[in-house]
Image (cartoon, rainbow, N blue to C red):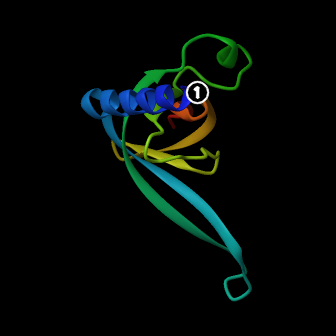
Amino acid sequence: MSGQLDSKSRATAERLLNKFGKPAVYVEITEGAYDPDLGGNTVTETNHNINCFIDEAKAGSLRASGLVGATDLVVMIADKGLDLIVDNTDKLIIDGKRLTIIRDMPEYSGEKIALHFIVCKSS
């Protein structure tokens, strides 16, 4: 039963964001092995075209603790089809601006993640 609800919830989240969301790019940054010729690790960027919903970081525990500022954003994206492991080294590109990821707050629909609420630095 959990698997059925999981797949329906994930599909609904994706469908709603595709219909009403704003286009963006999720940049997955993967660090490779050390390359002695370059003197560092190779870095690979994989772009995922997504649709998202953008909101301001509201007052609450994150704001009170100083982890997010008044101009930071909370970006909601659907996980279906991406199966992302959101990392602080990854980036979001919205309206040509490259945003830094501060924190991911996943929302589960069962065993899998349906939505990611990603807190980003807007500047």
Which quadrant does the N terminus fall into?
A: top right
Left or right: 101 as drawn, with respect to 82? right
Q: Percent position (x, y) of residue 108?
A: 58, 27
Residue furthest to the top in view is 59
Q: Is residue 65 above or below residue 43?
A: above
Decide which of 114, 6 is in the foreground and name it.
Answer: 6
- Which residue is pictured at 50% across the width and 34% down the height? 122
At numbered mark 1, what does the secondary structure look like: helix, strand or loop? loop
Label 1 neighbourhood size at 10 Å, few (<14), some (14-19), many (20+)?
Answer: some
- Which residue is pictured at 51% across the width and 24% down the height? 71
- Write down the residue under mark 1: 110
Residue furthest to the bottom in view is 37
State which quadrant residue 101 falls in.
Answer: top right
State which quadrant residue 61 falls in.
Answer: top right
Q: Amino acid at mark 1?
A: Gly
Left or right: 109 as drawn, with respect to 33? left
Q: Is residue 114 above or below residue 26?
A: above
- Which residue is pictured at 50% across the width and 30% down the height? 6
Decide which of 35, 50 is in the foreground and name it.
Answer: 50
Residue furthest to the front in view is 1
Q: Percent position (x, y) of residue 13?
A: 40, 28
Residue furthest to the left in view is 19
Left or right: 57 as drawn, with respect to 63? left
Decide which of 118, 40 is in the foreground and name it.
Answer: 118
- Which residue is pictured at 54% across the width and 20% down the height? 57
Q: Percent position (x, y) of residue 109?
A: 54, 26
Q: Is residue 96 above or below residue 30?
A: above
